[in-house]
Amino acid sequence: MDFYSSYAHGFARVAACTVPVTIADPAANARTILEQVRACHEEGVALAVFPELSLSGYSIDDLFLQETLLEAVGEAIAELVAASTDLLPVIVVGAPLVHGSRLVNAAVVIHRGRVLGVAPKSYLPTYREFYERRWFAPGDDRRGSTIVLAGQDVPFGPDLIFSATDLPGFALHVEVFEDMWVPIPPSAEAALAGATVLANLSGSPITVARADERHLLARSASARCLAAYVYAAAGQGESTTDLSWDGQTMVYEHGELLAEGERFPEGPRRSVADIDLELLRQERRRVGSFDDNRRTHEARIGAFRTVDFELRPPIGDIGLRRKVDRFPFVPDDPERLAQDCYEAYNIQVSGLEQRLHAIGQPKVVIGVSGGLDSTHALIVAAKAMDRLGRDRSEIHAFTLPGFATGETTKSYATRLAKSLGVTFEEIDITAAAGQMLSDLDHPYAEGESVYDVTFENVQAGLRTDYLFRLANHRGGIVLGTGDLSELALGWCTYGVGDQMSHYNVNGGVPKTLIQHLIRWVADSGQFESDTGDVLREIVAQEITPELIPAGEGEAPQSTEASVGPYALQDFTLHHVIRRGHRPSRIAFLAWHAWRDADTGEWPAGFPAESRVAYDLATIRHWLDVFVRRFFASQFKRSALPNGPKVSSGGTMSPRGDWRMPSDVGPSAWLAELERNVPQG
């Protein structure tokens, strides 16, 4: 496997192109188009889509019916076909063509010296400024047809899918302009028939707000069809006798805008993006209702024809022309991040509200350490009590210091609890933990500095044991605090430990999002100002379990030194549970996202001093750790307490997003990682 090749990882580079048109001069337009196709070839582009009627111009009215023009169009197509022999891109251009006794508005698909097929426009607008039926016949009734073009007898109809035999998942369907505006577009049927890349050649003139409507249609088509949508509109050079043109170009994938070109450009423009064919295939496997819809429409879907061709994609590192989020659970856009935080926080709050209401309004018992997770769970509980009209004193918060508890974190817990007005107490577990270690005949009880898993879990288990007995004693439920990232990595103590609670509000929230949630709660005025001040201090501290005492001059125990940077592990987590990606692909994406701290966007409020980079060797190492820990920890996830799903990225609940045997091993995943990811 060529690790550095985007094509090897299932991506395909596409371009939505708009060019200055010379109306009624097909020869000039062919030359202009070829210049852009050659530029696309140099960029490693597999698909270049040009506007509707780009060989003739869209706005030439009755000149469409002139024999001189139609002959020139045929010659221009022949020129494009001949010139394409040694060029990589599949070329899609618009042209008026004669089929039978009528003229059709068609998209011609050309690749490496061959016309692969012709897709006619199915639905012709004849309203307001449009008069297309004056010249053209609709193509919706021409399924199963052929046409002679450039000396070749080629498939013709709206029922064609062009499939690359050497690039799995690249299956192209082409529609024209108005086809995307009807209730059931040809592209929707094509997607059900297997098309993953949907192209639209548009001659759409521009009016105020029409660009937004195009975005809406392209985005919704890509989302509903689990596909990529490549849109190219006519622009400079079209006649402005009565209309104007903006040359809008865009590429969508599964509802996400990957690339968009300048509108009203001077000269040619290309919107280039690498679409993720593997992601689209994964989504279609996962979303069974997509194929169920195909079964409903099988009579038409089954009649689609497939035209196979060999793309011969480039090899080697050509970069990756798409944004890869460093933090897939955390949006870079400040407004989107604020909206996500609002929704996530209220999902958690309303989940706890309903649980308390359903079981008779018990008190809430929670352990607070001054760390991120317990802090966030506490402010969720406080807001739930506010909304239920109950006094916050019915939250019983306990700090349970052990052998390595620091004064700083304990002070955070104390200050936060007091600022919120909850019932707060301290129970020092040091003596009880020492007694248990002595009963276990552990070396620590004899004065040895042995800080093994037993030493750590005695403390974690005692804390949970105390909380459950306190809940019994005070008529409450234990509120869990462990987050999604810890559950994925097994960074929790099973059974009588922090893995267990009566209800866990954090189980659907990844570690990388929690700090933003806490910051949002502080900055949006959910609580009093003194609470907000403490929350901001808590967010700034290093993540530590505080289970192992630090020696003189030693740094406190670091969670991330054991399980890896949560930034990388949450990146992997998202691509495992949401996308089902193999390790080498995750490493490839992580390398592009993390190799340069100065490239790409960071979430709002992310500290500048924390903006780090990771090389491939580091990414590979922690990916190996993730795989091993993830498989080894399923038994913990199989026994999770209840709690709400928060992120569309998924959750670890065995009753929800994630079902997996507890006794399965990681051999296949580790072998794939070893085989396909360089050492760095």
Image (cartoon, helix red, strand yellow):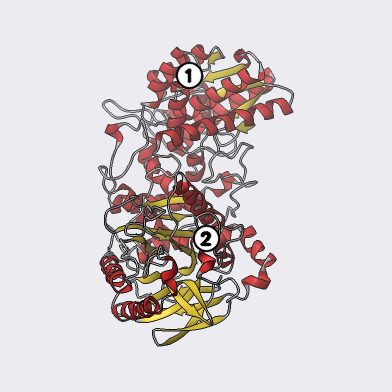
Query: Residue 525 shows which numbered tag?
Result: 1
Q: Quadrant of the N terminus?
A: bottom left
Could you say where residue 564 lies in the image, as x and y percent from the top left? 37, 43
Q: Position of residue 336 (x, y in %)?
A: 45, 36
**Mark 2 residue crowding within 10 angstroms, few (<14) / some (14–19) / many (20+):** some
Q: Would you identify the image quadrant in which residue 501 lies?
A: top right
Q: Quadrant of residue 273?
A: bottom left
Determine the secondary structure under disc 2. Answer: helix
| Disc 1 to disc 2, C-alpha distance | 48 Å
Closest to the observer, 220 or 279: 220
Q: Nearer the viewer, residue 83 or 237?
A: 237
| Three-letter residue code for mark 2 | Glu
Tell me what residue is drawn at x 28 percent, y 25 percent: 552
Q: Total of numbered circles in the picture?
A: 2
Q: Reply above or below: 160 against 18.
A: below
Q: Which mark is residue 178?
A: 2
* Residue 546 is at least partly visible in this image: yes
